[in-house]
Amino acid sequence: MSQTSNETKVTRDFWPKLKKSLASVPFAEEVIAAYYCAFDPATPIKVKGILLGALAYFIMPLDVIPDILLGLGFTDDMAVLYTAISMIRSHMTQAHRDKAKMTLEKLKAETI
């Protein structure tokens, strides 16, 4: 997939997927911080490409281990995202993390 295709898919499908699976995603705050980093205009294109590819994999309904499998479903997503995040860690700012934490708190409050 191209970066433009990934960006379109992530923009369209990220929040619905996250809201639907919020209780099952133990690394939700990192995923949200990656999202904010990917869409930050100050983030370099190469970093955006890495993050958008990982986020597109996260939202794909069919992947190596289907998300529907309890306990295992997000392990492949987590591996892809943590690999991507470890590659670009220096570009993920405290502002991305703070915004992710606030967003996650709001999402959890909406689902209660």
Image (cartoon, grey):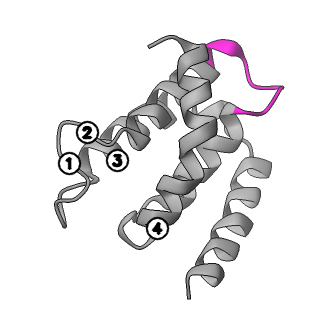
**Residue denoted by label 3:** 78
Q: Secondary structure at mark 2?
A: loop
Three-letter code for the amino acid on which mark 4 is drawn: Leu
38 relative to 110, above or below: above
Give the spatial CA distance, label 3 vs label 1.
12 Å
Residue 65 versus residue 61: which sits nearer the camera?
A: 61
**Residue 105 picture location, percent across and down:** 66, 75
Q: Secondary structure at mark 4?
A: helix
**Residue denoted by label 4:** 22
**Residue denoted by label 1:** 66
Give the spatial CA distance, label 2 vs label 1.
6 Å
Is disc 2 surrounded by few (<14), some (14 to 19) or many (20+) residues within 10 Å? few
Give the spatial CA distance, label 4 vs label 1.
16 Å
Three-letter code for the amino acid on which mark 1 is drawn: Pro
**Residue denoted by label 2:** 62
**Residue 98 picture location, percent across and down:** 75, 59
Give the spatial CA distance, label 3 vs label 4.
14 Å
- Asked if labels 1 and 2 touch by Cβ distance under 8 angstroms, the answer is yes
**Residue 67 picture location, percent across and down:** 26, 53
Three-letter code for the amino acid on which mark 2 is drawn: Leu
